[in-house]
Amino acid sequence: MSSLARPVTLQFPPSLELGQGTASAVGRWVEAQGCRRVLVVADAFNGDRIDRLGLPGQAVVFDRVKPEPDIANLEALLAVAREAAPDLVVGFGGGSAMDLAKLAAVLHDCGQTLSDVVGAGRVAGRRSALIQVPTTSGTGSECGTRALVTDAANSRKLAVESRHMLADVAVIDPELTTSVPPAVTAATGVDALAHCVESFTNRKSHPLVDLYAEEGIRLVGLHLARAVAAGDDCEARMGMSLASMYGGLCLGPVNTAAGHAVAYPLGTRFGLPHGLANALIFPYVLAFNAPACPTKTARILDLLGQPGGDAPSEEEVFRLAGGFCRRLGIDATTSVPALAEGDLEAMADEAFSIKRLLDNNPREVGRDDILGMYRHLAGNQ
């Protein structure tokens, strides 16, 4: 079946607020809807910025979201949520906060547990309203229907997908991202890029989704370096907020591929932030996939301002993509811990088991291919 004939479902939040100073739209929506019991899910940094949302009255705040949230972190949140019995849950932060907000909204009062809903289409429903407010430009989770949580017992990501986790309102205010440090801006920005690229080159790619993917890539090429260099560059921050949102929209109908599968063990085993793990892996997988999708790879490089010709080689793609990341300050030599061969072998096993993503990749990926990427990243070859 051609990509044009393939069925596709693209879901948007029913209401989208976008622009500088829009964070206070949350409070206006709460008043208009008459919500009385509000639970805000945030990380520690954003717990002190709840006033930016303009909420009327008091809200219950859970501000203990971890950078790579695990089941214990989710259970702590659910205990608070069951006590608060919210009629509105607000995710306020990066992807981790927004993902846990989704899970809290659907699990706090439905009788289901996390194990009941892991996978696709297993959530029974949602009674609480849900608003998502991103404070980074990376995951695009504000417009997504997936949530990830780590099972610390086996260092694996558990993925939940459901239309019931789509926000009622997404409020994207680039002013909330101006305080993000340069290194985090760079890593989360390449994560947004990876979402767009992995959907664009995906076996399940679709022309409708490609529109958002290409525009997201173009915006990263135009604005990410500027946002890293000057955090208060409002135009650059707006561009990256849009790029992140477009990446999130791509994930619903298409999802990611080998890049994220290979990146996950760096986060679950060694605590690397999700954005940084994806940024470190990005040049490797883009180069690996180049022979399978040369035209789209050339288009990606052009959109990033790194032209490599009509059919760039794997070596050329790696050089150009790696240079793009290094100029943003993303450097494996200062980010990746010392890894023994046994670590690399175990990581390769874990990544190779994530078939839900590897099956989307345009080029078949073997375990040895993944191991080679890890060895190169760790300087072991």
Image (cartoon, grey):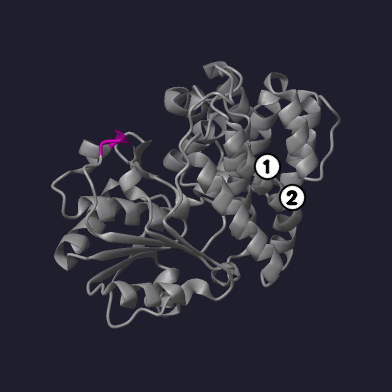
The percent coordinates of residue 121 (x first, y second) are 30, 35
Query: Which quarter of the image is occupied by the N terminus?
Result: top right
Query: Which quarter of the image is occupied by the C terminus?
Result: top right
The relative height of residue 319 versus residue 64 in the rendered view (above or below) is above
Q: Label 1 belongs to which residue?
A: 214
Residue 247 visible in image: yes
The percent coordinates of residue 233 (x first, y second) are 70, 70
Residue 246 falls within the magenta-colored stretch? no
Q: Residue at x 54, y 41 (%)?
A: 250
Question: What are the residue bounds of the magenta stretch?
Answer: 118-122
Along the line of sight, the residue nearer the viewer: 349 or 210: 210
Structural crowding at the residue carrying mark 2, measured as other residues with C-alpha within 10 Å and reported as few (<14), some (14–19) or many (≥20)? many
* SS at badge 1: helix
* SS at badge 2: helix
Rendered image: mark on residue 221 = 2
Kind of residue indicated by mark 1:
Glu
Q: Residue at x 67, y 47 (%)?
A: 215
The kind of secondary structure the magenta stretch mainly shows is loop
Kind of residue indicated by mark 2:
Gly
